[in-house]
Amino acid sequence: MSAIQSRIIAQCDNYSARNYHPLPIVIAEGEGVWVWDTDGRRYLDCLSAYSALNQGHRHPRIIGALVEQAGRVTLTSRAFHNDRMGPFLEKLCHVAGMDMALPMNTGVEAVETAVKLVRKWGYTTKGVRDGQAEIIVCSNNFHGRTTTAISASSEPAYRDGFGPFTPGFVKVPFGDADAIRAAVTPDTVAVLIEPIQGEGGIVIPPDGYLAEVRRICDEAQVLLALDEIQTGLGRTGRLFCYQHYESDAEPDVLIVGKALGGGVYPVSAVLAARDLLGLFQPGDHGSTFGGNPLAAAVGEAALDVILDEALADRSRMLGDHLMRQLRAINSTRVAEIRGRGLFVGVEIRPEAGPARHYCERLMDLGVLVKETREQVIRIAPPLVITTEEIDWMVAQFRAVL
Ligand SMILES: *Cc1c(COP(=O)(O)O)cnc(C)c1O
């Protein structure tokens, strides 16, 4: 590592709260699937900011929309209308097959919005006893870092020292539909679920799980809320991950974020039918930056790129290729390779050491990945990656594994 990088890392260690444990690299530039450190060394970004960079770094159409809008107006406050939010939300609703959307900024704010929405529906429509609404969530989930989101979490590292917690979450094992059926009570308003657990280690539920959860929700008059912040917008080889199950797993509430901001700006949203999102009245909820014209311009361009470049199809085809190539490495250090589209987990056997060790070695070879949980390397490159770039990435994995 150069003196410049050491100095910058020391500066961050001194002035930044240590709520992350980054790899020792200092990125200075990015374009497409590649980033460069302060010494000009090039790396393939296979994390994509946790799938916020599905369109790649600095996609020209998205940067173009950002710059163009920055030259007109950036923030108006929701006290007035702006000329960009309507077109953006119409497109988003059309793409998602939903009636209405509520725009926020970060993913966890959209999760919070969804929690408020399903509770409000419970009290006003289902007739749940006041203050008693329950939301069923899965252990090993990740829905963000606010006090309410960690209240839904089962992960000690996310929770320890941060109580008291928001009540009203009931936790069941992921992938077990019977456990959900058993947990439903007359006060249950929603099941909140990730179609594939990303931070949890790329955990894919058994076939038929989501469709069964959908059936349980229908029978019990419970809403199905899907957190597709990481799995949505093309990442898993469909526009939304639930579409792997055709029409059998359609959510009542769809939560999106990350790639909706095209890797340049935080944009998130909650989508639902009119009889749900129509429950919000003026004053119920809000966000200073939610739906601002810069976010709307960026979000619209981010969607256009995903659709026009058919990134979901690309993810499906290249993901199959990537998994075939990775499995062909046949390393005894690997316990399992699993994934959907370009959303792949390589689980390292415990006796072969922690995944972070492999991430550090891969970084030395020019591939940026990061462990999630102790033993899983998550591979999630920008969806604009080429077959040749994947083959190069796999060669580095072969060297390290
Ligand atoms: C990243 C993520 C969030 C939180 O999004 P932020 O933008 O970091 O607040 C919530 N749910 C899932 C599934 C995520 O991957």
Image: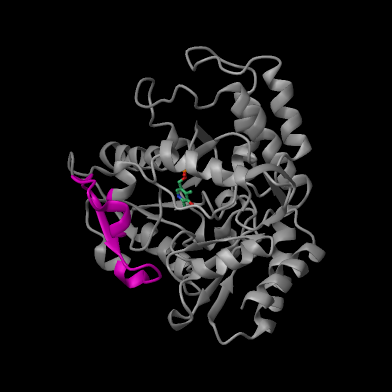
Does residue 97 appear in the picture of this structure?
A: no
Q: Nearer the viewer, residue 106 or 188?
A: 106
Q: Is residue 351 covered in magenta?
A: no
The part of the image, by quadrant, that contains residue 193 is bottom left
How has the structure been colored for display? one colour
Q: Is residue 308 left or right of residue 332?
A: right
Q: Which residues are magenta?
A: 151-179
| Residue 173, position as x, y percentages in the image | 33, 68
Where is residue 120, by image quadrant?
A: top left
Front residue of this view, candidates 163 and 119: 163
Q: Quadrant of the C terminus?
A: bottom right
Q: Is residue 24 above or below residue 340?
A: above
Left or right, 18 with reference to 289: left
Residue 341 percent location from the top left of the image: 65, 65
Disc tally is 0
In percent of the image, x 58 and y 49: which residue is there? Answer: 49
Percent across and percent down for residue 351 are 44, 83
Q: Name the side, left or right, on which 322 lies relative to 137.
A: right
Q: Position of residue 293 (x, y in %)?
A: 61, 22
Location of residue 344 with respect to 24 vertically, above or below: below
| Viewer can see residue 79 | yes
| Residue lying furthest right | 388
Question: Residue 164 magenta-drawn?
Answer: yes
Outermost residue on the top side: it is 80
Residue at 68% x, 39% y: name it: 302
Depth check: give the residue in front, 111 or 272: 111
Asked where in the image residue 327 lies, by quadrant, the reply is bottom right
At horizontal 78% and vertical 49% (from top left) the residue drawn is: 309
| 20 lies above or below 72 | below
Residue closer to the observer: 227 or 347: 347
Q: Residue at x 53, y 52 (%)?
A: 230
